[in-house]
Amino acid sequence: MTKVATKVSAIETFEMTEQVRTYLQEQMDFLAQHAVSQIGAIANYANIAAFQQIPSFEQMFGNAAGDANDSAQRELKYCAQSVANSTDLLVQQKSNANVWGAQDASGVQSTVSSDTDRNKIQLSEFGYNVVSETGERHVKTMSDIGLLNTHFGIVPTTSREERYELFVATEHDKKRRKQEMQMRTESKFTENKAHNECVVQIVKVAQSTAHLV
């Protein structure tokens, strides 16, 4: 029998059958892999203008020493997981407000929006929405993972490295399917264009020979 603490602080028990444990383990593995995909999405969009490839393991999770870097290795070295957990603190939508001049120590001049926080990653409206919404889902996913671990002692059956490898494979598969869809669309367009040109030629012949009928 397994004890579970309820919201009213009462202790209830239930039988942890093999079927229940298998189900909970499947949910843990699904959530763990989903969390990696969410981190990957954030890594892609956290600096969408400068980052156009699958994020590295270190960019998503930090290196062996725990040092975290964002996708562009920029001065503010935030890991995607840090962004996921603190979106409002680390990310800001690009401003359209008034600007003012700025000059750094090396003499480089630039303009900065009046309500821009230079300590935050600046994103387009689309990128900001993707990062914010994905960050919220990631926090919920990690909360669910924590509950499964706390109440049932369940941990993912795959390592973080294995989940990252599956994420990369999934991203490549998405890109392949997107390219195949694009090729089918272009092929269909070419086919329709050829058909339309054929119809036009038939119409021209019919018009030029109408007086012979």
Image (cartoon, rainbow, N blue to C red):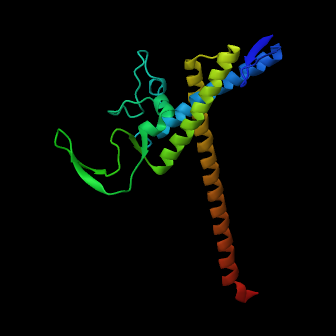
Question: Residue sitting at 41 percent across and 24 percent down?
Answer: 68
User: Which one is nearer the viewer's eye here, 162 or 33?
Assistant: 33
Query: Is 128 drawn above or below residue 20 in the view shown?
Result: below
Left or right of 173 on screen, residue 10: right
Vertical comparison of 65 with 194: above or below: above
The N terminus sits in image quarter: top right
Residue at the top extreme of this rendering: 1
Q: Who's the residue at 40% across and 28% down the image? A: 69
**Rendering coords of residue 188 (x, y %):** 66, 55
Q: Is residue 179 left or right of residue 22?
A: left
Q: Is residue 49 visible?
A: no
Residue 142 in the image: x percent, y percent? 60, 27
From the top left corner, tell me how far across and down residue 121 is, in percent: 39, 40
Q: Is residue 156 left or right of residue 43?
A: right
Residue 204: x, y in percent?
65, 78
Position of 148 relative to 93 (above/below): above
Q: What residue is at 35 percent from the left and 33 percent from the top?
A: 76
Q: Quadrant of the C terminus?
A: bottom right
Looking at the rendered structure, the number of numbered marks drawn on it comes to 0
Residue 197 appears anywhere in the view:
yes
| Residue at 62% from the left image edge and 43% from the top image edge | 180
Q: Residue furthest bottom?
A: 211
